[in-house]
Amino acid sequence: MKFLCVDCDEQMQFAERQEPGDGTFAAAFRCPGCGRSVALLANPFETRLVSSLGVKIGGRTLDAQPLEQVRATVRGREDAFVDDGNREAGSGERPTPAWSPDAKERLARVPGFVRGMVKRIYADYAAERGIAEITPAVMDRARSELGLEEM
């Protein structure tokens, strides 16, 4: 979709995007020929629809990120997909429990695109309960207690 200036018949150029925080967004476009401006205001429903389709109003300034559309729709922890198994004890966070060889082997069978999230779930489960090493038995117990048996 492109906006055209009615007077100049030139393609309008993106000028600015604003997200006021109430679920709406606004985008402004300017005609390079005559300087005329036009703005688009989307209500919360339209904003969600546009976002779910992966449309980037105003173009992209960064390269696409892996699983970008999934990440945009997942609610919860911002770092859910981050595989940071190298947290250190003095960093203000709980240290990550060690992984037994059998548990590492089992984790390696998890599809790569969710492995970081699965690893985080087990690591957090173990850390919250003071478990120093994640084993297949710990993984089974976590799946049961967290209701993940069907996954």
Image: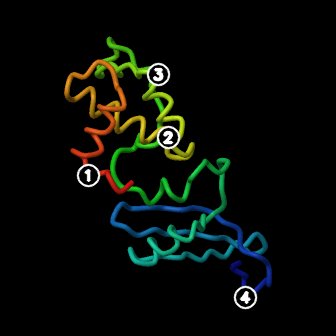
| Residue 54 on image: x %, y % | 58, 66
Secondary element at image label 3:
helix
For disc 1, the marked residue is 147
CB under 8 Å between discs 3 and 4: no
| Residue 70 on image: x %, y % | 50, 57
Does 29 sit above or below residue 115?
Answer: below
Q: Nearer the viewer, mark 3 or mark 4?
A: 3
Q: CA distance from mark 1 to mark 2?
A: 18 Å
Give the residue at x 27% y 28%: 126
Does 15 sit above or below residue 132?
Answer: below
Q: CA distance from mark 4 to mark 1?
A: 58 Å
Estimate how packed mark 3 is, as few (under 14), some (14 to 19) or many (20 or more) residues with alpha carbons within 10 Å: few
| Residue 88 on image: x %, y % | 38, 15
For disc 2, the marked residue is 115
Q: CA distance from mark 2 to mark 4?
A: 52 Å
Does 85 sit above or below residue 118?
Answer: above
N-terminal of the two: label 3 or label 1? 3
Give the residue at x 31% y 39%: 140
Secondary element at image label 2:
helix
CB under 8 Å between discs 1 and 2: no
Determine the residue located farthest toward the top in the rendered image: 90
Secondary element at image label 1:
loop
Q: CA distance from mark 3 to mark 4?
A: 67 Å
- The amino acid sitting under disc 4 is Val
As drawn, the label of residue 101 is 3
Dividing the picture into quadrants, the one containing residue 37 is bottom right
Q: Going by the image, does 56 lie left or right of 96? A: right
